[in-house]
Image: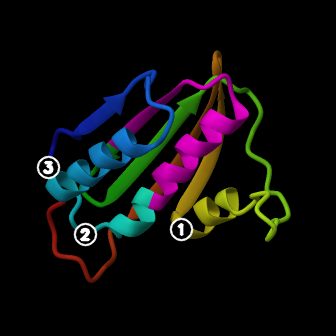
Amino acid sequence: MNAEPHVVIEDSPHRDSSGARRATADFLLHYCPWADGDAVLLVVSELVANALRHTAGWWRLHLTAGQDTLVVEMDDSSPLPPVPREPDFAGGGGFGWHMVLELAGRVEVRPLPYGKRVQATWMRPASAQSGC
């Protein structure tokens, strides 16, 4: 695949991650069936939830499938990087960022002029057939 397909959900008016999850599931089905859909959907859900909870509320999702990679990028308005917190088993959260770090193959946080970008990358397993 020469052209890298991508989908962008910009400045979502939704107050939850359902639109991002639907778009991601559709993207995976068409462009990256080898990816662990449950892991990718959970990462997308957590990144949206973090953007809504810890920023002014807008977020932008980018999904890109290369021949052997899947990249999920979440931009938001906060310049502050995510900080791992001690999980609170009494309902106070603290699990999401740990899950993102565990489920994605590689996670990077980059500053942007208007906030930050969290990038999660998965590599195609060697056992997967060629062609995304």
- Quadrant position of residue 19: top left
Q: Secondary structure at mark 3?
A: loop
| Residue at figure coordinates x 49%, y 51% from the top left | 45
In the image, is residue 15 above or below residue 27?
Answer: above
In the image, is residue 124 above or below residue 41?
Answer: below
Q: Secondary structure at mark 1?
A: helix
Q: Which residue is mark 3?
A: 1
Which residue sits furthest right?
A: 86
Give residue 2's mark.
Answer: none
Mark in the foreground, 2 or 3: 2
Left or right of 39? Residue 116 is: right
Circle 3: is it few (<14), some (14-19), or many (20+) Cα within 10 Å? few
Residue 110 position, x and y percent, is: 64, 36
Separation of disc 3 and disc 1 at Cα? Answer: 25 Å
Q: Which residue is mark 2?
A: 34
Write the start and end of the magenta stretch as one range: 42-63
Separation of disc 2 and disc 1 at Cα? Answer: 15 Å
Left or right of 16? Residue 6 is: left
In the image, is residue 114 above or below residue 125?
Answer: above
| Residue at figure coordinates x 43%, y 26% from the top left | 12
Q: Is residue 3 magenta?
A: no
Q: Secondary structure at mark 2?
A: loop
Left or right of 11? Residue 64 is: left
Circle 1: is it few (<14), some (14-19), or many (20+) Cα within 10 Å? some
Q: Which residue is mark 1?
A: 103
**Amino acid on which the number 3 mark rests in the picture:** Met
Separation of disc 2 and disc 3 at Cα? Answer: 15 Å
Q: Is residue 60 magenta?
A: yes
